[in-house]
Image: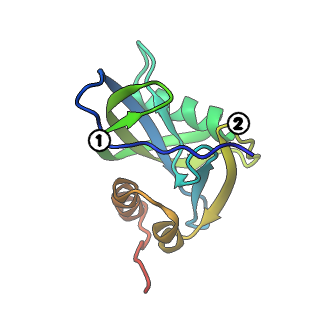
Amino acid sequence: MTARIQSESPRADKETRKVLSSGGVIVDERGRVLLLRRADEGIWCFPKGHVEPGETPQAAAAREIREECGLLCMIGRKVSEIRYAYYWRPDDVNYDKRVVYFLARPESSDIRLEDRFDAWRWVSPSRALRMLFHRNDKDVLRKAAKAAGLTATRKT
């Protein structure tokens, strides 16, 4: 079992590193969204990761999706861009992170999770809203669902 750690509020006494990441909201032919659960924090999220030097955000999104969950995806339109800051204890630094998200359609179906993840689920956008932890991720989902012609409402 992986020990659970969490990001924290940025610390004034620590170095801050800027990071550009890219990811995808993967929507299948049934209108379901793929969520991955991080093994370290135990939270549900979308696949995303750092944009490498010389790489476009679209290419990074496709690569990160393939690396994190094994799916080949067609990367569509940009649906959201978010920014947030946090302190990450394992690196002992603050991160100022910008993430560009794209709508993605799977072109393969065999999911193989990277070690950083311990579970995956195809869920309706409404269910995804209940599972996602971060407000930013919920906002990204709403924008992606709208772009895909789906409904993402939280049922109470």
> How far is the residue under mark 1 from the one under mark 2?
24 Å
**Above or below 91: residue 40:** below
Kind of residue at disc 2: Asp
Whether label 1 touches label 2, CB < 8 Å? no
Q: Which residue is mark 2?
A: 115
The answer, for residue 78, to whether it is visible in the render is yes
Q: Which residue is mark 1?
A: 84
Q: Position of residue 77 (x, y in %)?
A: 38, 45
Please state, as top left, top right, bottom left or bottom right, where the C terminus lies in the image. bottom left
Residue in view at x 61 percent, y 67 percent: 30
Of callouts 1 and 2, the N-terminal one:
1
The answer, for residue 71, to whether it is visible in the render is no
Circle 1 packing at 10 Å, graded few (<14), some (14-19), many (20+), is few
Q: Identify the element where label 2 is drawn.
A: loop
Outermost residue to the left:
12
Q: Identify the element where label 1 is drawn.
A: strand
